[in-house]
Image: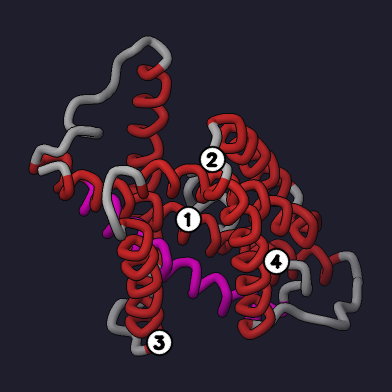
């Protein structure tokens, strides 16, 4: 979904969160407002609301132009936030608005192939979010450095395969078993969904790390953006899986 995967995406590496707090401290800057878990959660809801606005527009008026424009705009916003976290209060809302154009257009396409697929994919995404939050809170799975490394490697491998497939697409080719409705393809989709779900644990951990390290307030937007990236990825993967199952 993005560049280097030290967490669920290039935004939420633990190092960037500690660097944000450490940088301010080393420069002798007094941070009056610090990032909190509740603040990051609130920012996530705001981003979700912004995404829904443009998603509804593009769902009613789907087009390849909106999808491409949304993809490019969203990618630029993510890269800006990744390289300059202080820009997150602007980059995060911009990302949500652009990505809504992608979500709406893609959802409109899948809605034509299967009745109720949007509701099912949304329900599965929200259900997975709540389940992983419960797992994180009860510490059924602890986010250790080893766990973070394994998930990061799996996420990076998936991104690499998707990147190769996208490049092959320019030449009219694609990786076998990635887009068909075979049981192998369905198994691959399930694996990707599991990895995306594990990334949610890293996102939740980043929320807490930002608060524990007394990170600056803008890191709430930074963390919220990271969670949105993971949720959108998860939703799109559920759409793909449901479509494959419907075509069996």
Spatial CA distance of label 1 from label 4 is 16 Å
Q: Choose the circle earlier in sequence order: 1 or 2.
A: 2
Assign a secondary structure to mark 4: helix
Q: Choose the circle earlier in sequence order: 4 or 2.
A: 2
Residue 207 in magenta?
A: yes
Q: Choose the circle earlier in sequence order: 1 or 4.
A: 4
The mark closer to the camera, 1 or 4, is: 1
Q: Locate residue 182 relative to residue 94 in the image: left or right.
A: left
Say which quarter of the image contains residue 70: top right
Say which quarter of the image contains residue 157: top left
Residue that label 1 marks: 232
Please name whichever residue, 188 or 57, is drawn nearer the observer in this view of the structure: 57
Spatial CA distance of label 4 from label 2 is 28 Å
Asked if the residue at tag 4 contacts the one at tag 1, i.e. Cβ–Cβ closer than 8 Å, the answer is no
- Main SS class of the magenta portion in the image: helix
- Residue at point 63% right, 68% down? 49
Residue that label 2 marks: 62
Please name whichever residue, 170 or 30, is drawn nearer the observer in this view of the structure: 170
Q: Choose the circle earlier in sequence order: 1 or 3.
A: 3
Spatial CA distance of label 1 from label 2 is 18 Å
The mark closer to the camera, 2 or 3, is: 2
Label 2 crowd (10 A; few <14 / some 14-19 / many >=20): many
Q: Which residues are magenta?
A: 189-214
Residue that label 3 marks: 137
Q: Residue furthest top?
A: 171
Res. 223 in view: no
Q: Choose the circle earlier in sequence order: 2 or 3.
A: 2
Residue 244 in magenta?
A: no
């Amino acid at each position: 979904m993005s560049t280097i995967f030290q967490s669920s995406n290039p935004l939420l590496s633990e190092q960037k969160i500690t660097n944000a707090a450490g940088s301010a401290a080393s420069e002798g800057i007094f941070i009056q407002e610090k990032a909190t878990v509740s603040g990051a959660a609130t920012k996530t809801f705001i981003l979700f609301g912004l995404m829904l606005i443009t998603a509804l527009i593009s769902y009613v008026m789907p087009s390849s132009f909106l999808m491409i424009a949304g993809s490019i705009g969203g990618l630029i916003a993510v890269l800006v936030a990744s390289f300059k976290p202080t820009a997150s209060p602007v980059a995060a809302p911009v990302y949500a608005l652009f990505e809504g154009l992608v979500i709406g257009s893609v959802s409109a396409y899948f809605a034509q192939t299967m009745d109720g697929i949007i509701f099912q994919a949304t329900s599965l995404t929200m259900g997975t979010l709540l389940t992983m939050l419960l797992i994180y809170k009860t510490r059924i799975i602890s986010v250790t450095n080893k766990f973070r490394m394994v998930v990061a490697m799996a996420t990076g491998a998936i991104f690499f395969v998707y990147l190769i497939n996208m490049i092959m697409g320019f030449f009219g080719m694609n990786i076998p078993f990635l887009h068909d409705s075979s049981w192998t393809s369905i198994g691959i989709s399930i694996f990707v969904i599991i990895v995306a779900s594990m990334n949610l644990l890293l996102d939740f951990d980043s929320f807490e790390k930002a608060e524990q390290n007394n990170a600056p307030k803008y890191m709430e937007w930074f963390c919220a953006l990271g969670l949105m990236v993971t949720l959108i990825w998860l939703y799109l993967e559920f759409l793909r899986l449901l479509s494959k199952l419907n075509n069996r």
